[in-house]
Amino acid sequence: MIRFIRSLFITGRLIVLLLLVVAFFALGYSFPPMQSVATASLWIITVLVVIDLLMLYGRGDAFEAERFLPARLSNGDENEVTLKLKSNYPLHVDLQLIDEQPYQFQAREQMFTLRLMPREARHHVYKVVPTERGDYRFGRIHVFVSTNLKLMRRRYTIPAEQNVPVYPSFLQMRRFELLARANRLDEIGIKRVRRRGHSMEYDQIREYVKGDDIRTINWKATSRSTSLMVNQYQDERAQEVYTVIDMGRVMKMPFNGMTLLDYSINAGLVMSNVALMKHERAGLITFADTVKTTVKAENRRLQMGRIMEMLYNQQTDFKESGYEQLYAHLQRTLSRRSLILLFTNFETLHGLHRNLPYLRAINRRHLLVAVFFENAELAEEMRKPTRKLWDIYYKTTLEKYIYEKREIVKELNRYGISTILTAPENLTVDTVNKYLEIKSRGLL
């Protein structure tokens, strides 16, 4: 009985009908014939409610639901959740479905409305966009079933608790990989960079083909052959590319629901995959006040899995970033010249100048690219119309912060440090473009 009562709900239609009956009874004090109308109406409603209850409860558990989740979710991307619904009712039923989503989504009022045919099975797909990494827990599935009468509603609660991890954006990584294999990277803003000259890594000698650079003719090999022979070169391979991610408090700043750290992790994952596709050796370093994790640069098949697992649980600890410790760690760990893609953020020139000596020292031994962020919200505020004197003061202050970002770029460039100043949503594309530019110019 308790289970029956807990699963039974009154619909809005029944409440309206009962209110009308009450109104008829009230009118019966002034117009006695309305008493008979009210009594008849109440009996009709009672009969309809009994019929509705028999249709809802006459077959026991007449509804089934099951949730299907991917083995892991991709952070910052749309991920599909599939609900398999099956009605064993011999009539049309209307559903109101609530799936208990993880608290991270804050989806407390999300409800799906469906209509199923008699004994129909259907897959309902909806999408979720996680904005932080970690373990997500899905709860029970609640389904409220009503018939065409819509006087009563029966609730089915299906146990479907599931835990699923949210990893850095592997969907974005796969999208880049597929477009690269199809030679369609220009569709997402990756520039085709013209190679200047050729690398010095020798591959083989082959016969001259019309269009080959005559400067690559191998005269010694030609003298021993009956045709022109040329040296063939290939991109220099097995160079080390390290993604270095700052996990200090400056990376906790949010943008569109995600922190700068998560944007950096997603871009770093794509960048590592691109480097491996270019036959480079990809590695990872994360640091805050001290160096937290290190994945040595390798070009093995399982390297991407190691990098992804290492990035899964990285979090800011709200401490000052220790560039001195980073420099010392690079000195001890990296024995050869490498490309260092440093994902960090500087808001003021003063903050840059405190760490500039270490950045310059890193750049003397390696090729350092400092990647930091435009404050997109400030740029949006600057585009708003100016109506009052206060708006002028406000925009002047904003302009000062925007100007300081440009000065930071100039200061780094003055000491030969390459920079990428970009909006968070453009981070991945701009980083890959910079890497391809470095490769084309043979700077590493």
Image (cartoon, helix red, strand yellow):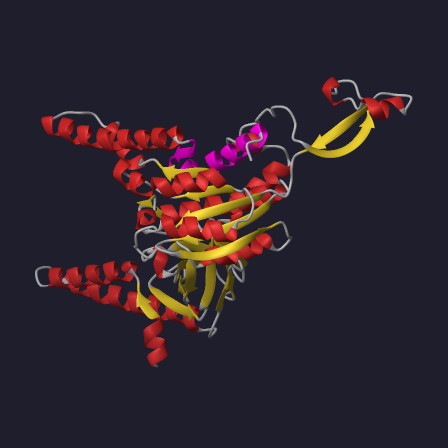
Between 416 and 119, the one nearer to me in the picture? 416
Which residue is at 24% across, 62% downward?
15
Instruction: Residue at 37% x, 45% y: name it.
Output: 260
Task: Tell which of 104 and 54 is nearer to you.
Answer: 104
* Residue 197 within the magenta-colored segment of the rendering: no
Q: Quarter-wise, where is residue 51 in the image?
A: bottom left
Name of the residue lying farthest toward the left:
30
Query: Where is 237 relative to 230, above or below?
Result: below
Picture coordinates of residue 245 (x, y %)? 42, 48
Is 355 positioned to the left or the right of 283 in the image? left
Residue range highlighted in magenta: 416-441
Q: Position of residue 325 (x, y in %)?
A: 39, 52
Quick one: quadrant of the C terminus? top right
Q: Is residue 371 placed above or below 317 in the rendered structure? A: above
- Rendered position, 194 above or below 179: above
Residue at the far bottom in the pictured view: 1
Q: Position of residue 168 (x, y in %)?
A: 47, 52
Residue 119 falls left or right of residue 208: left
Residue 429 colored in magenta in the image: yes
Q: Which residue does the image show at 41% across and 69% down from the upper left?
A: 156
Q: Where is residue 246? Give x, y as percent.
A: 39, 49
The one nearer the camera, 70 or 155, is: 70
Dominant SS in magenta: helix
Let me know if residue 130 appears in the view.
no
- Quarter of the image containing the N terminus? bottom left
Disc tally is 0
Task: Say whether residue 237 is visible.
Answer: yes
